[in-house]
């Protein structure tokens, strides 16, 4: 879906409370500037060999420019569901069409002094080739989990993606096979 126009700072987002209930709306730039809590979808994309799609964000991104990330995804638009945003963002950033619906895993609230958003974490299988969106991604590769783990201490990662990855690892350690903890 690389022919789509990238979402802008003017995109309208739902603003949510501590329980992820919609309490208003604001443009993305205002949500970031005023630290208004909104929603985001994180999608871990794996190729058929189980390797994880890893990329470096472009230098002109509104948030976390030029940092590495192991998730594709982004903000959830006003009135959009997490599931719809996860699929849309994955197809846009990977530059593919026809992905299966990403599997929802869990949700968590990401809070720092600068940022605040509810995050839904997903996983999807992606058949290469991928054609990442040049306006979003400067570099990409599929890495094994061991390769990714080795690079966690070497590369500068998006803090929200790193938080989601650590929560995913903890969730996998504590989840029984086939069991999805409540969101």
Image (cartoon, rainbow, N blue to C red):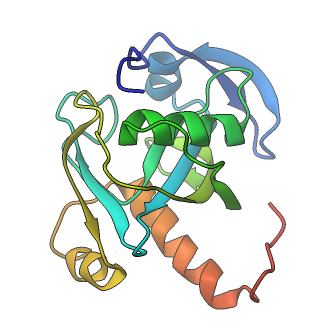
Q: Residue at x 70, y 42 (%)?
A: 83
Looking at the image, is 48 positioned above or below residue 38?
below
Q: Quadrant of residue 18?
A: top right
Q: Is residue 25 left or right of residue 88?
A: right
Q: Position of residue 169 (x, y in %)?
A: 53, 80
Looking at the image, is 76 positioned above or below residue 42?
above
Q: Is residue 178 left or right of residue 117?
A: right
Location of the C terminus by quadrant is bottom right
Q: Position of residue 58 (x, y in %)?
A: 20, 36
Location of the N terminus by quadrant is top left
Q: Quadrant of residue 121?
A: bottom right
**What is the number of callouts on the image?**
0
Extreme-top residue of the structure? 10
Instruction: Kindly tell me whether residue 51 is visible in this rendering.
Output: yes
Looking at the image, is 84 positioned above or below residue 170?
above
Instruction: Kindly tell me whether residue 108 is visible in this rendering.
Output: no
Q: Is residue 154 left or right of residue 21?
A: left
Q: Position of residue 145 (x, y in %)?
A: 36, 80
Q: Residue at x 46, y 28 (%)?
A: 32
Q: Nearer the viewer, residue 70 or 164?
A: 70
Q: Nearer the viewer, residue 140 or 108?
A: 140
Q: Residue at x 36, y 18 (%)?
A: 3
Q: Nearer the viewer, residue 16 or 171?
A: 171
Q: Position of residue 116 (x, y in %)?
A: 56, 42
Looking at the image, is 36 positioned above or below residue 166?
above
Q: Residue at x 74, y 19 (%)?
A: 24
């Amino acid at each position: 879906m690389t022919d789509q126009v990238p979402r802008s700072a003017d995109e309208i987002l739902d603003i949510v409370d501590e329980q992820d209930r919609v309490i208003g709306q604001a443009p993305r730039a205002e949500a970031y500037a005023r630290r208004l809590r909104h929603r985001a979808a994180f999608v871990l994309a794996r190729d058929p060999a189980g390797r994880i799609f890893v990329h470096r964000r472009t230098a002109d991104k509104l948030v976390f420019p030029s940092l590495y990330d192991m998730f594709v995804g982004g903000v959830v638009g006003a009135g959009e569901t997490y599931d719809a945003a996860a699929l849309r963002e994955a197809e846009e950033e990977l530059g593919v069409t026809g992905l299966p619906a990403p599997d929802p895993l869990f949700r968590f609230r990401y809070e720092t002094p600068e940022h605040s958003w509810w995050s839904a974490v997903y996983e999807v299988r992606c058949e290469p080739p991928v054609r990442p969106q040049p306006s979003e991604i400067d570099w990409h590769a599929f890495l094994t989990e061991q390769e990714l783990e080795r690079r966690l201490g070497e590369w500068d990662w998006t803090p929200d993606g790193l938080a989601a990855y650590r929560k995913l690892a903890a969730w996998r350690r504590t989840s029984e096979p086939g069991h999805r903890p409540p969101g």
